[in-house]
Image (cartoon, rainbow, N blue to C red):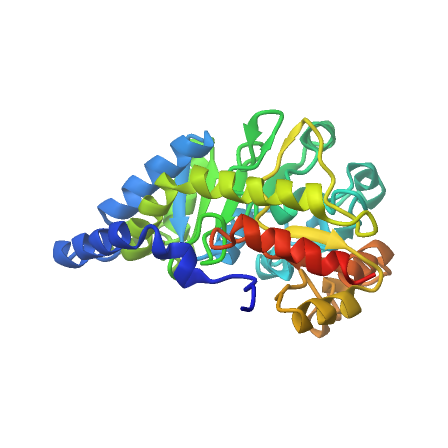
Amino acid sequence: DMIEYENLTKANALFVDEIKTAINEVVESGWFILGQQVEKFEQEFSAYVGANYCVGVGNGLDALTLSIKALDLPRDAEILVASNTYIATILAIIEAGLKPVLVEPDPHTYNIDPARLSVALTARTRAICITHLYGKSCQMDEILRFVQSHGLHLIEDCAQSHSAKFKGQQTGTFGIAGCFSFYPTKNLGALGDAGAILTNDEKYAEKLRHLRNYGSRKKYVNAYVGTNSRLDELQAAVLRVKLRHLDEVTQHKRALAQIYFDCLPKWVTLPQRHADYFDVFHIFAIAFEQRDDLKKFMLENGVRSEIHYPIPPHRQQAMAGHISGDYPMADRIHAQELSLPISYATTPNEVREVCEVISSFQ
C-alpha cells in the first residue's frame, strides 16, 4: 500500500459528523456572509492564539496583502522578506505596491536570519514580513530588537505555524499583524480557501474590517478603497469545529516528528530543535544532497513525499523585474529540501516504514 503524503478524506474523517452538523446549521440559518459563524470564529481564534482582535478574510494571501495595505506605507517603501519563503509572502508585498527586499535564511532553521537583516536595511525600509516556515517560529528576540531599534512594522506570515511558539508565546502575536492561511492541508485547515489576520491594535483591526468588505463597515458607506475578501460563513463554521481539535492535531504531528528524530538515518539533515521553540511540524523538512534520487527511490518503495519548494522565488519568471541578486542559501534549500509524510492521517507505523525505506537508500 502506498503511504500518502496527505489524505484529506482520512484527515477530516474524525471530525466529519461535527463538520456536517456545523454546515447544516449555516444552511438552515439562511445567513452566508459575515454572520455569526465568522464573528464566533474570530473570537475563538484570537482567544486561542492570544491576540485581541481577529479579522477573517478570504485566504492567506489576502491576509498578507490587506495587512500590508492597511499600514499605508509610502509608495517607494521596502519590506524585508525571506529569500526562501513561499512566493505568496512576496506576491503580497508587490500586490500592495511595495518593494520586496530578500534576506537569506539561517541554514539550520530555514527561517529568516536575524543577523542578515541590518545588511538589507536601507533608508526606504519600512517593514519586515517574516515567515514562520514549516511550523517553526522565527528567532523573535533578535527580530523584535531589530524592528524596535529601526522603528519598523512587523508582519508575521503564520500560514504554516498555527500553535507554534517562541518562548511560550504563539506566533501571530509579536507584530502588528499575524497572517494565517487555513488552506485545507494546514494544521488548522478549512474545506476550501480561508484566512485571518490577528492584531492587538484596535484601529488597525477596524481598518481591516473595512478593507475586506469593499472599504465599508456600514452598508453602502465606503470609507476606504477596499476589496472583497471575507471569510465565508460555511468555512468559519468548519474552522470552529477544527479549532476545537487543533491541539490533538498538533500533538499527533509532534509525536510523528519524534519518531522521525528517533529513527531516521544520520546522513539526512533533520530539522533543528531547541528548548525556546515549540514546533508544530506543519511540514517535516529534511535536507539531503541527492534529494531527487532519494525522492524517486522512496516513490518506487511506496512512499510519497513533497518538495517545499522546487523553485526559489528569485528564479521564478514572475519575479523578473521585482527581484535581483543571488541567493545561494535559498538555492541550496530548494535543491535539498524534502518533505516527509506527517499528516493528521499519517500513522506512527507508516512513519516507521518511511524511516526504514529511507535507511535502505544507502
Q: Is residue 311 above or below residue 137?
A: below
Q: Position of residue 303 (x, y in %)?
A: 62, 65
* Quadrant location of the C terminus in the rendered image: bottom right
- The one nearer the camera, 298 or 165, is 298
Q: Nearer the viewer, residue 248 or 320?
A: 248
Residue 74 pos. (x, y %): 63, 49
Nearer to me, 198 or 303: 303
Q: Residue at x 26, y 47 (%)?
A: 37
Which quarter of the rendered picture does the N terminus lie within? bottom right
Q: Is residue 133 left or right of residue 164?
A: right
Q: Residue at x 42, y 43 (%)?
A: 207
164 horizontally vs 274: left or right: left
274 relative position to 175: left or right: right
Q: Is residue 53 above or below residue 341?
A: above
Whether residue 217 is situated above or below residue 194 in the rendered picture: above
The image quadrant of residue 32 is: bottom left
Q: Position of residue 220 (x, y in %)?
A: 26, 56
Displayed quadrant of residue 136: top right
Would you say 271 lies left or right of 194 here?
A: right
When the figure is inspected, residue 325 is found, relative to residue 293, above or below; the finding is above
What is the count of numbered marks? 0
Whether residue 101 can be seen here: no
What residue is at 71 percent from the left and 31 percent from the top?
274
Measured as percent of width and height from the top left, residue 239 is found at 35, 48
Res 310 seen here:
yes
